Image: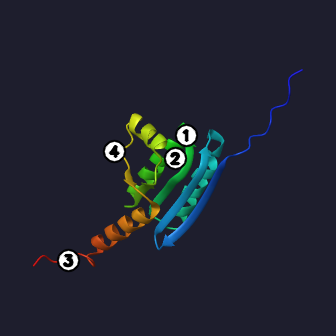
């Protein structure tokens, strides 16, 4: 007699916030398994549905990422490009960054050392596009 399968217990904790108008942060803590991809997609789609075009993925507390999550990041990048948005990956642990490198995805994404650095970068790029923070050279 075989024993019944144990239900999957997710080690993923997702946090979604909008620290600035038009900028969303998805904090990914723990491990992203194949069973967690639906929740990650829902978080991404929820931000786009609210009109957020620039998304930061805070990976600073991410332990491991299933291959399907990389598909989510790629789809998000493609969707952001269609609406003139931007995606930044923040605080990426070395073990996860190595996977991005080996998959040849590092050149597809922008990286920041931290969520705060990513917010500064997105805020600066937004104001530069609007022409309000550029300094004139004298």
Q: Earlier in the sequence, mark 3 or mark 1?
A: 1
Task: Place residue 100 in its image quadrant.
Answer: top left
For marks 3 and 4, give the CA distance.
Answer: 29 Å
What residue does disc 4 label?
Answer: 107
Query: Pointer 3 and pointer 1: residues touching (CB < 8 Å)?
Result: no
Camera-side mark, 2 or 3: 3
Q: Earlier in the sequence, mark 2 or mark 3?
A: 2
Query: Pointer 1 and pointer 2: residues touching (CB < 8 Å)?
Result: yes
Task: Place residue 47 in its image quadrant.
Answer: bottom right
Residue at left offset 42%, top offset 50%: 78
Query: Dot 2: what SS?
Result: helix
Query: Dot 1: what SS?
Result: helix
For marks 1 and 2, give the CA distance.
Answer: 7 Å
Q: Earlier in the sequence, mark 3 or mark 4?
A: 4
Could you say where residue 126 lies in the image, as x and y percent from the top left?
Answer: 34, 70
Q: Which dot marks residue 68?
A: 1
Camera-side mark, 4 or 1: 4
**Rendered view: 106 above or below 135:** above
What residue does disc 2 label?
Answer: 72
State the residue in front, 52 or 102: 102
Could you say where residue 76 lies in the image, as x and y percent from the top left?
Answer: 47, 52
Residue at left offset 64%, top offset 54%: 13
For marks 2 and 3, give the CA distance.
Answer: 37 Å
State the residue in front, 23 or 53: 23
Q: Earlier in the sequence, mark 4 or mark 1?
A: 1
For marks 4 and 1, give the CA distance.
Answer: 19 Å
- Near mark 3 (Cα within 10 A), the count class, few <14, some 14-19 or many ≥20, is few
């Amino acid at each position: 007699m075989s024993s019944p399968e144990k239900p999957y217990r997710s080690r993923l904790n997702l946090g979604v916030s909008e620290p600035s108008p038009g900028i969303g942060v998805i904090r990914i803590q723990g491990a992203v398994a194949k069973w967690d991809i639906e929740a990650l997609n829902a978080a991404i789609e929820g931000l786009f549905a609210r009109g957020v075009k620039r998304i930061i993925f805070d990976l600073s507390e991410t332990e491991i990422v299933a291959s399907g999550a990389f598909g989510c990041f790629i789809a998000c990048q493609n969707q952001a490009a269609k609406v003139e948005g931007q995606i930044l990956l923040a605080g990426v642990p070395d073990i996860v960054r190595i996977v991005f490198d080996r998959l040849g995805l590092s050149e597809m994404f922008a990286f920041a050392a931290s969520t705060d650095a990513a917010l500064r970068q997105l805020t600066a790029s937004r104001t530069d596009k609007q022409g309000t923070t550029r300094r004139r050279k004298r």
